[in-house]
Image: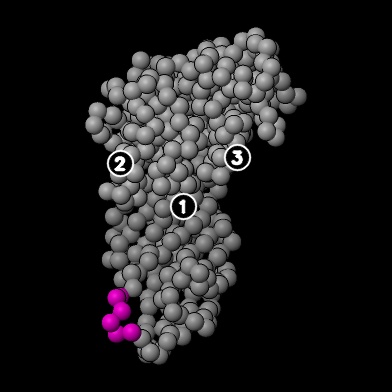
Amino acid sequence: MAGAASALFLLDIKGRVLVWRDYRGDVSAVQAERFFTKFIEKEGDPASQDPVVYDNGVTYMFIQHNNVYLMTASRQNCNAASLLLFLHRLVDVFKHYFEELEEESLRDNFVVVVCGLIDVCFSARYLMERDVDSFWTLQYELLDEMMDFGYPQYTEAKILSEFIKTDAYRMEVSQRPPMAVTNAVSWRSEGIRYKKNEVFLDVVESVNILVNSNGQIIRSEVVGALKMRTYLSGMPECKLGLNDRVLLEAQGRSTKGKAIDLDDIKFHQCVRLARFENDRTISFIPPDGSFDLMTYRLSTQAKPLIWVEAQVERHSRSRMEIMVKARSQFKERSTATNVEIELPVPSDAINPNVRTSMGSASYAPENDALMWKIKSFPGGKEYMLRAEFTLPSITDEEAAPERKAPIRVKFEIPYFTVSGIQVRYLKIIEKSGYQALPWVRYITMAGEYELRLM
């Protein structure tokens, strides 16, 4: 099996070990702490470095969340992607229990949950009928019985919470694990019941745009996700159909102007990958509640949905004027909402005088920016902003020139997708034969959306 870890470490911002669990006895906490401390000193901020580092026969894989580093170490030829994914899932589990993962929450909850959760997430065997008389006995049972030699086994927080429960500074483990732990469908428990069976599917696309000072697009991509919330009884079988060009062509259907090419697709573990590879059918038994069914990325050139031009004029050493034009470049039937345009201004600018043809603008000196907010921005419209600032009359001639920050844009466009993806059908089949209501919604939003100034 690929992906075996020798040990798991949780470290603070200085590389000191907060929590660690040894699985194979060939990487010590002292060894990992020395490596990470040297790595920080040598490379600077680890968050900006490669997440996989090989050193002296050991492969270290780490991620950062708030002021905590999560790291695995292995002396084997391991599956780095699998272990990195496990670390991200471990963050989700901790957040489920602690609300947020940070050094303080780890210290406060270490004796309550951390040891048990780490071992449960790496475990293939579960605590069956045990008489647990004390907290420490329970801890050792978890550490000894629930570790499977460093192989990631189970990381579904909702199922974990069914048999590892916390209350103040007390941890409980149910006498029997939930059926989901031993079933093939490990992400869903049996016996779920709802009075009203519903499925909500949100198709969310984020547009990442970077435009240089000459108005040329130097980066353009669309990152999409199919986000689901399922409230279904029993063990339902779901089938989802998209306007996938490969599928439509295989069925002999016309694809002119209606189909898209899906690239870089990643599925939730509930999706039957073999079925998708064979006939492009997305078939799955969904987890209960919220989850991301699928993510995808389109690297095709996307036209900026909201274009912003800015002219900066200095009328004298003590006065500056900014003229901004914002234009929506999508069809009139769509409307962008919650539009926010962040315009950088000099850090020493004061006394702003702002006029807009639509929306409101406010000066945010803590961000050295002017914030222009437009609640509703229909397609094919253009709005203007003009602002005057006072500058200090005396400047330091030896001061280094200020780095010009880019214009940043945020927005949401409901009932619209850049890629043109469409949900053709969403079928729910369950042996009891109940009728379920599927709801589908589309939304496009700004991701990393920046336009550089001259």
Relative depth, front residue between 268 and 35: 35
Badge 1 marks a residue whose secondary structure is strand
Q: Earlier in the sequence, mark 1 or mark 2?
A: 2
Return the residue at label 3. 108
Q: Residue furthest top?
A: 129
Q: Amino acid at mark 2?
A: Asp
Q: Amino acid at mark 3?
A: Asp
- Asked where in the image residue 82 lies, by quadrant, the reply is top left
At 48% across and 78% down in the image, what residue appears? Answer: 386
> Mark 1 Cα within 10 Å, few/some/many (few <14, many 20+)?
many
- Is residue 156 at all visible to an observer of this figure? no
- Is residue 372 at all visible to an observer of this figure? yes
Relative image position of residue 359 (x, y in whole percent): 57, 69
| Number of numbered markers | 3
Q: Amino acid at mark 1?
A: Ala
- Asked where in the image residue 179 lies, by quadrant, the reply is top right
Return the residue at label 2. 50
Could you tell whether 164 is left or right of 33 in the image? Answer: right
Badge 2 marks a residue whose secondary structure is loop
